[in-house]
């Protein structure tokens, strides 16, 4: 999506993928800095590690405690400094609004998964003003830790660990269950039937339809996968690096072509 956007705007830039062992992350960031890179994206497991490896954190990275975007820019002393951003939370919120018509403020949400993506999503939902947030994770202590953080930072949000007993507005999967063909659904429908929610969002975008989304569609729910989140976090990173508006339609078409072949 970035290379398509660079071409559309006539920028002589290139977006490349590099596989970096976590123990070499600091050296990789320094290498990119001295080689004159404009910026970087980081994915799992680098997002948490990078928080302590950049010169300064944008408010977004401070708030969510993770860095997925780095910008290299000249400092007043002439050296090139590294700035860390987080565009994931904003990308998720925009995707939920654009793809499902979900207004987070006032909503009741069930979030599956309490890893890095789950924590960022939970905090973003709380900031946006959901009224009730239910957290489910295979290791309950991780969900409990996030619930405690939300209680301290957002006391107006009712947060609980476990499945809701009543109807809600949205189920979000932030776990990795669904990436592999044989994966079980991350949702235990004996504890929470899909008929009790109006919308289901799965952060996974490959495959396009996970077992969870297929079941949700069959139950009459509105559904969306994580392609929109990928798009919007990327569009925000594009703006950070270039200072120009992102050609979102071109980026979306490039993503769909690359991931789904159409």
Image: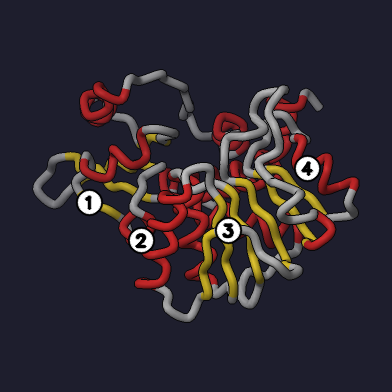
Q: Quadrant of residue 27?
A: top left
> Can you identify the residue that label 2 sits on?
63
Q: Tell me the distance, in whole angstroms, between the alpha carbons under discs 4 and 1.
A: 39 Å
Residue at position x 39%, y 32% in the image: 45
Residue 18 in the image, given as x and y percentages of width and height: 41, 19
Q: Nearer the viewer, mark 2 or mark 4?
A: 4
- CA neighbours of label 1 inside 10 A, class few (<14), some (14 to 19), many (20+): some
Q: Quadrant of the N terminus?
A: top right
Residue at position x 41%, y 50% in the image: 141
Q: Nearer the viewer, mark 3 or mark 2?
A: 3
Q: Nearer the viewer, mark 4 or mark 1?
A: 4
Residue 234 in the image, given as x and y percentages of width and height: 54, 43
Q: Are marks 1 and 3 in contact (CB under 8 Å)?
A: no
Task: Give SS at disc 3.
Answer: loop
Residue 168 in the image, given as x and y percentages of width and height: 72, 67
> Can you identify the residue that label 3 sits on?
162
> Can you identify the residue that label 1 sits on?
56
Task: Give SS at disc 1.
Answer: strand
Residue 150 in the image, given as x and y percentages of width and height: 42, 67
Q: Nearer the viewer, mark 2 or mark 1?
A: 2
Q: Residue 213: which numbered mark, if any?
A: 4
Q: Tell me the distance, in whole angstroms, between the alpha carbons under discs 3 and 2.
A: 25 Å
Q: Is residue 137 left or right of residue 85?
A: right
Q: Tell me the distance, in whole angstroms, between the alpha carbons under discs 2 and 4.
A: 30 Å
Task: Pick whichever of labels 3 and 2 is earlier in the sequence.
Answer: 2
- CA neighbours of label 4 inside 10 A, class few (<14), some (14 to 19), many (20+): many
Q: Tell me the distance, in whole angstroms, between the alpha carbons under discs 2 and 1.
A: 13 Å
Task: Give SS at disc 2.
Answer: helix
User: In this view of the protein, can residue 109 be seen by the observer?
Assistant: yes
Task: Pick whichever of labels 1 and 3 is earlier in the sequence.
Answer: 1
Residue 44 position (above or below residue 193): above
Task: Pick whichever of labels 2 and 4 is earlier in the sequence.
Answer: 2
């Amino acid at each position: 999506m970035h290379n398509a956007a660079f071409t559309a705007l006539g920028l002589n830039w290139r977006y490349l993928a590099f596989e970096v062992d976590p123990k070499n992350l600091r050296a990789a960031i320094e290498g990119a800095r001295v080689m004159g890179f404009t910026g970087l994206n980081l994915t799992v497991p680098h997002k948490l590690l990078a928080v302590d490896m950049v010169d300064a954190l944008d408010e977004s990275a401070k708030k969510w405690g993770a860095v997925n975007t780095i910008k290299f820019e000249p400092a007043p002393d002439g050296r090139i400094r590294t700035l860390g951003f987080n565009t994931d939370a904003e990308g998720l919120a925009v995707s939920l609004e654009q793809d499902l018509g979900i207004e987070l403020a006032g909503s009741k949400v069930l979030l599956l998964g309490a890893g890095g993506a789950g924590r960022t999503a939970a905090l973003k939902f709380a900031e946006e003003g959901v009224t009730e947030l239910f957290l489910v994770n295979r290791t309950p202590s991780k969900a409990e830790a996030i619930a405690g953080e939300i209680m301290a930072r957002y006391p107006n949000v009712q947060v609980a660990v476990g499945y809701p007993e009543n109807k809600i507005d949205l189920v979000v999967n932030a776990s990795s269950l669904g990436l592999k063909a044989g994966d079980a659904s991350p949702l235990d429908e004996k504890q929470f039937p899909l008929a009790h929610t109006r919308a289901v969002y799965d952060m996974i975008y490959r495959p396009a339809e996970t077992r969870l989304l297929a079941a949700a569609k069959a139950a009459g729910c509105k559904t969306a996968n994580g392609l929109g989140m990928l798009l919007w976090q990327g569009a925000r990173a594009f703006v950070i690096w270039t200072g120009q508006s992102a050609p979102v339609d071109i980026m979306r078409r490039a993503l769909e072509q690359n991931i789904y072949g159409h």
